[in-house]
Amino acid sequence: MNTETDFSTLNSEASSDWSTDVLIIGSGAAGLRAALAASESTDVTLITKTTLKESNTLYAQGGIAVAMNVDDTVDLHVKDTCSAGCGLCDIQVVETMVAEGIPRVNELLEWGADFDWEGTLPRFTQEAAHSRRRIVHKGDATGRETTDVLVQRVLNTERIQVISNAFAVDLLTDAVSSTDDNSTTCYGVSAIIEGQLKYLYAKATILATGGLGRLYPCTSNPEVATGDGFAAAWRAGCELIDMEFVQFHPTTLFLDGAPSFLISEAVRGEGGRLINIRGERFMDKYHEKGELAPRDVVSRAIQNEMFQTDFPCVYLDITHKPADFIQERFPTIFATTKRYGLDINIDLIPVRPGAHFMMGGIRTNAETETNLRGLYACGEVACTGVHGANRLASNSLLECLVFGVRAGTNAASYASSLTCESPPKIQIEKCETEANTIGLGDDVILELKDAIRETLWENVAIERYQEGLELTLSDLEEIGAELNLHPSSSMSIQTTDVGLCETVNMLIVAWVITHAALTRDESRGAHFRADFPDEDETGWQKRTVMAQDKEPEFVKLRSN
Ligand code: SIN
């Protein structure tokens, strides 16, 4: 069996280089599943920012949406996904995800995933905006179960080499030497490993670095989610699409001394009620589906209640359910809140919205190809168009499994098609700018990160408006000045300071999100403009594409 390995153990010649056929960056469900698929035909190296298990996947509570229940069909799941996506989903890619999701989930079950079961079928639960009970789950720890199964399999696969504590910095491309703008090829990544900048060369590279919730002060995401993959892709010349669509989950725990922690939508799916500080149940005022309205509607309603009552949170009440049901169905939430003094059998849970999921990302087709040859992307960092303007609950793990396999298979076949023995050893040109050599203390880095988070929370969160968005762009430029770079910078990074890299990455991604949000002067899905509160059905049935040194471009949806 393999283990998670330190680079120096693996690379005993102490060279700063490493070569592989397929390099996978990120170890959430998408990266792990891609590694397993690619390893069926080629050698794979998987690098991860901290440990193999740490990712957004690990913390996913709800489950995996899949059309396997007796009263369910692929068509119904496609319909619910597209209706949550508010007219911006690519229906053909949605059909692919929903149909291929069934064998992907069956495969997980065959590999030993111990999901909750009822008779001959998984016990399907209900979540918002689903017309059927279709969420397979393991209590409220589906992400942990999925991670455990995939990690075990990866570690048992000889052809997969895992390198932990490797912070991917910049994609290695031949952009400088290439004469043709449209033919940039990616050959791996530079990474900070054991305090040094190393080059990891690959015939094919897959970005599966996950999300960016940590750009906001309130989030359900773990500390690693600082948007690094989006920023590296931006610097390398990738197109980013739909970046204005950040999903805010309505219910993250708001408790003194407790970390930001998700309180699953499944709690509302099982009958949980939202009430304000005055004890009033309020969701029926906002939507016919009450607590199970789409996430953006519930998040805005909560924010409004907080404002109306001048109180920093609302409450989720599940106390009317039997205690043994609560403990069995939500063991993680029960245990975590207990640690901070709450007994959810009798106590209300203080909650408020937090950044949860990025619908946009690196533009890919259904084959997970990006606009750089040899570079693939899957999972949250990628945008195939399956989520449109708002993701349906529990479609994210499904996306990771389906497009993880597609990325792994396609990258392996591309790598095998190359005639070269090993990938070319691209060097990143040294640019001795202050941004790269600057030595900022840890306290300054924390201050800059907080400043990015504050301005995003204030102006680029649940409700946006033009003046606020413009203010944030100028705040970001000021923060950039401290780092001696413009927030849209495409300059490669040569520092070995992970905190500094994260700050630069957060700045770039914050700028792209804000710019995209300013461009879309309508409200749709997770993007709500208080100054343009309605959906512009005719003018804005299109997606926003951003790339370095270019004005935003708009792509019309394929006619389906
Ligand atoms: C949740 O459990 O509420 C989150 C599930 C999801 O984001 O799909």
Image (cartoon, rainbow, N blue to C red):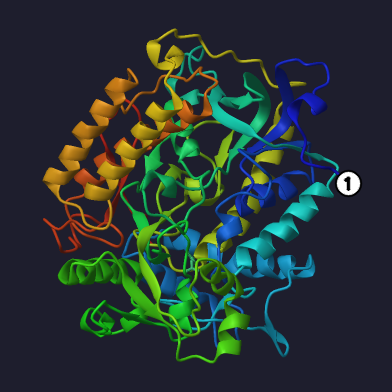
Query: Is residue 116 placed above or below 237 in the rendered structure?
Result: below
Residue 226 lies left or right of residue 303; in this view the side is right
Residue 112 lies left or right of residue 75; in this view the side is right
Q: Which residue is painted at 69% across and 83% down in the image? A: 117
Q: How many marks?
A: 1
State the residue in front, 438 or 544: 438
Q: Measured from the top left, where is residue 251 in percent x and y? A: 39, 68
Q: Quadrant of the C terminus?
A: bottom left
Q: Which residue is painted at 83% across and 20% down in the image? A: 12
Can residue 217 be seen from the camera position used here?
yes
Tell whether circle 1 marks a residue whose Cβ is less than 8 angstroms from ligand 1: no
Query: Is residue 510 placed above or below 55 in the rendered structure?
Result: above
For badge 1, the amino acid type reads Met
Query: Residue 168's quadrant in the figure?
Result: top right
Q: Which residue is mark 1?
A: 1
Q: Measured from the top left, where is residue 135 in percent x and y? A: 56, 76
Q: Which residue is painted at 46% across and 33% down in the image? A: 502
SS for dot 1 = loop
Can residue 559 be seen from the camera position used here?
no
Q: Which residue is painted at 52% across and 47% down in the image? A: 210
Q: Measured from the top left, where is residue 448 in percent x and y? A: 34, 32
Query: Is residue 370 placed above or below 303 in the rendered structure?
Result: above
Classify 10 Å Cα crowding around label 1: few (below 14), some (14-19), many (20 and above).
few
Q: Measured from the top left, where is residue 533 in percent x and y? A: 15, 62
- Among all residues in the image, which is located at the extreme front? 341
Query: Residue 238's quadrant in the figure?
Result: top left
State the residue in front, 512 or 264: 264
Query: Residue 215's quadrant in the figure?
Result: top left
State the residue in front, 198 or 344: 344
